[in-house]
Image (cartoon, rainbow, N blue to C red):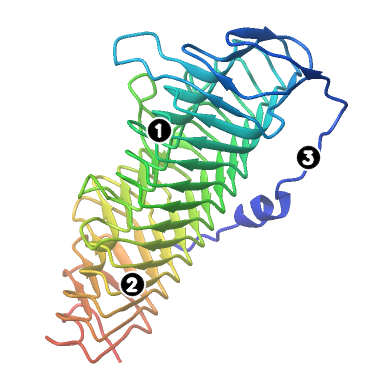
Amino acid sequence: MRRTVNRVVLAVATGIAGLTVSPTVASAAVSCGASISTHTTLTTDLNCPGTAIFVNAPNVILDLGGHTISGVQQPDGQPGTNGVQVSFNRTGVIIRNGTIRGFNRGVGINQGANDALVTRLTLDANALGIGIFGNPTSVSGARLVSNTITNTTRFSGIQMTGTGHRVEANTITNGASTGIAFNGDDHVVQANTITDAGQSGITLAAFPNSPGPFHRNQILTNKVVRQARVGSQATGINVNFGNDTVVTGNTVDGRSTANGLFVFDSTNTQVARNQIKNGNAGINVGGVSSGTHLLSNTLTANRGGVFVGSGTTGNVLERNLASASQFDGINVTSPSSVLTGNVAYNNGSLGIRAVNGVTDGGGNRAFGNALGQCSPSISCT
């Protein structure tokens, strides 16, 4: 019944190697609407009414040289503007070192533009910070690393589809919508800090042309603080239609109106060593999810610590700690669940509530809970 979280080590060890690519980049006077096909460093700021720069060749480095590109957002229904647009099939492009402000999309990466690197940018007051467009098989291998994305006006800080992207060490604040919204397979979303997102912090979910399921994604060591600034039902970390998703080592500190972590209609999700507080439910496993493994998570001061829905199957709850919840510490309504070594204390209702049919794996403990320690189906010490 137990599964180990064994892909995390590889992801952490990989780190951000390969980002010190610094060939000679020629300085250039670039005007609005320029199409570049060679390495270029800006020598001045730009203020552009439309898309500022098109990258139209593979393996181009665009260095903003610390300068600012400013633009204008077009209304919905009109062709949107980009601070920098990487054209179709232009692989290996690098964009770095400057500020992009006021566009529909700060950086737009199109289908086939594989292996892009976007790093050390500040993206401020764009409708969408960074967008990778297409479908889950049309673009791969992007690295979005160490960017600051703030004040998005309509959409997410980062929105992406494709395969095998790394989103790492970005800071995303005060956005209109979700911090990082993505789908596709084999992505690593790691060590990002998302504060005051209008909607969810991090969401793996279907887009209209990408219904899922989505395979082998990893959400690791991120920090999500005060999500749901605009949408009260948004979630800190949201896994929808996932298969073999790993969610490990994250911290979520919410506004008590939304779930800290929500697993919905997903298969074989491993949720381990996360710290979640001030959520509606700290962890909510719902829909027809199957094979969810909750291991060594710490849940503090949520309205409810853990809730496992009745339509789910094959759940394993092991060594989780739930304390200071307004209601139950752990509430399992699916009989297809195993509870082993969990601890619940100082909660406002029961410590551990479990329906008949749940398997008691032993070693569960509960104490100091207001309405009793455990329901009769679980033996607590």
Q: Amino acid at mark 3?
A: Gly
Give the Cα separation between the discs numbered 2 and 1. 27 Å
Residue 205 coordinates in the image, percent (x, y): 36, 36
Relative height, residue 38 to residue 233 (above, below): above
Looking at the figure, which quarter contains the C terminus?
bottom left
* Mark 2, residue position: 339
Give the Cα separation between the discs numbered 3 and 1. 30 Å
Residue 256 coordinates in the image, percent (x, y): 23, 63
Relative height, residue 114 to residue 338 (above, below): above
Where residue 213 is drawn, which disc sits there? Answer: 1
* Mark 3, residue position: 18
Q: Residue at x 29, y 53 (%)?
A: 313
Along the line of sight, the residue nearer the viewer: 335 or 343: 343
Q: Quadrant of residue 19?
A: top right
| Label 3 secondary element | loop
Q: Amino acid at mark 2?
A: Leu
Mark 2 crowd level (few <14, some 14–19, many ≥20, 10 Å Cα): many
